[in-house]
Image (cartoon, rainbow, N blue to C red):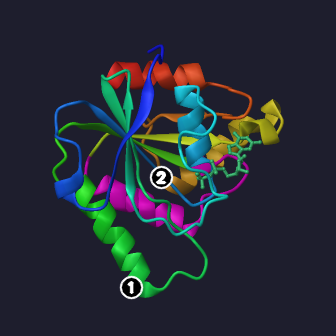
Amino acid sequence: MKVTKSELERIAVDREHYPENGLPEIAFVGRSNVGKSSLINALLNRKNLARTSSKPGKTRTINFYLVNDMIRFVDLPGYGYAGVSFSERNKWADIVNEYLFKRPNLRAIIMIVDIRHEPTEKDLIMYEFLKAYDYTSIVVATKADKISKGKWQSNLKIIRNKMNLKDETLLIPISSSDKINIDKLWEVIDGLV
Ligand code: GDP
């Protein structure tokens, strides 16, 4: 899809504030600071539409971006902040669960990990949590520009094994800053919506 228009349509916490169902949605999840906002901005070819981590890290909202008036990108709150209390974690889970529970127009969830590192314990818990919902999942290993291309495959293999990804689950190396494989991810999204 060639993006000609993108806007922040809605910031919501509760289901009653979500945009009306209907348009196909692609949701994005990832540990705080992993590069989720940068990926959304790269896909939309915008510099600063999605919030970035320079803003306070504890924002607990779901941001809906309307793309070409045709589909939505849904930016779920990041997880894994240091120093977050048990009740704040519960709040996070409530917000994410409420979205994932019965969202018939949700076509896929894109989970973002860092290609340089083994997935964290929280990444693994997140992935298990997503699997329970049975949506299509795609894993994106971002910041690929930070390691040499020769190391991509071995790092991807570690991620695939550690997360116990099924053979058919897509795992795509990406760089938002260098725009590596952004077009490939768009092809995948186009095939889903
Ligand atoms: P978020 O908290 O997951 O939304 O993370 P951000 O998108 O704000 O990114 C966190 C930091 O990683 C920022 O300093 C970004 O500039 C940097 N970053 C994100 N994606 C990439 C990437 O693909 N390559 C490089 N080199 N840096 C990245």
Q: Quadrant of the N terminus?
A: top left
Task: Please tell me whether mark 1 sits on a helix, a strand or a loop.
Answer: helix
Camera sees residue 168 = no
Q: Which residues are magenta?
A: 113-134
Q: Quadrant of residue 6?
A: top left
Instruction: Give the Cα distance between marks 2 and 1.
Output: 29 Å
Residue 157 drawn at (x, y percent): 63, 43
Q: Nearer the viewer, residue 76 or 8?
A: 8
Report the amino acid beneath label 2. Answer: Asn
Q: Earlier in the sequence, mark 2 or mark 1?
A: 1
Residue corresponding to mark 2: 164
**What is the x, y in percent for residue 186?**
48, 22
Residue 117 is a magenta residue: yes
Q: Is residue 41 magenta?
A: no
Task: Residue at 44%, 21% (x, y): give it.
Answer: 5
Q: Position of residue 91 (x, y in %)?
A: 35, 75
Q: Which residue is drawn at the image coordinates 30% and 36% (left, top)?
A: 25
Q: Is residue 149 above or below residue 115?
A: above
* Quarter-of-image position of residue 166: top left
Quarter occupied by the C terminus: top left
Q: Name the residue type under label 1.
A: Ser
Mark 1: C-beta under 8 Å from nearest atom of ligand 1 = no
Looking at the rendered structure, the number of numbered marks drawn on it comes to 2
Residue at the outermost top position: 2
Q: Are marks 2 and 1 in contact (CB under 8 Å)?
A: no
Residue at 68% across, 26% down: 180
Q: In the image, which disc is placed on residue 87?
A: 1
